[in-house]
Image (spheres, rainbow, N blue to C red):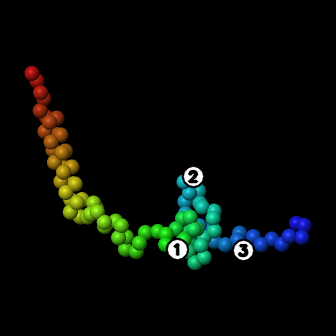
Amino acid sequence: MSGQISTTGPMLASPRCGAKTRAGGACRAPAVRGKRRCRMHGGAKGSGAPRANRNARKHGLFTGDAIAERKQVRALLGEARQLLKGMRFRP
């Protein structure tokens, strides 16, 4: 090196982001100070889901009642299919 001082040592020694990329490998960006992810994978301030995952409860699609109702509908449809399969239509 011709008189230049290398300042990349601390950057290269910093912990890396633990996120998985679309290609399946690990993200090689440095993690945000005090966090385990880089700024692009959730380490930035204000990123990520809110505490207690309030977004998941917004529509009620995954409440116990909704899941039980869908199970009943599927069972009823299965019974109807079996009934129709047992009935042979002959002119």
Q: Is residue 64 above or below residue 88?
A: below
The residue furthest left is 91
Query: Which quarter of the picture shows residue 87?
Result: top left
The residue located at (52%, 68%) in the rendering is: 42
The residue located at (19%, 57%) in the rendering is: 69
Distance (Cα) linking label 3 and label 1: 22 Å
Considering only order in the chain, which callout, 1 or 2, is on the residue closer to the N terminus?
2
The residue located at (23%, 64%) in the rendering is: 64
Given residues 77 and 63, the one toward you in this image is 63
Q: Please, what is the three-letter code of the amino acid marked with disc 1?
A: Lys
Mark 2 highlights which residue?
23
Q: Please, what is the three-letter code of the amino acid marked with disc 2?
A: Ala
Q: Are discs 2 and 1 less than 8 Å apart at CB? A: no
* Badge 3 density bin: few <14, some 14–19, many ≥20, Cα 10 Å: few
Q: Is residue 82 above or below residue 36?
A: above
Query: Which of the labelled discs sits on residue 45, or is there none?
Result: 1
Q: Please, what is the three-letter code of the amino acid marked with disc 3?
A: Pro
Mark 3 highlights which residue?
10
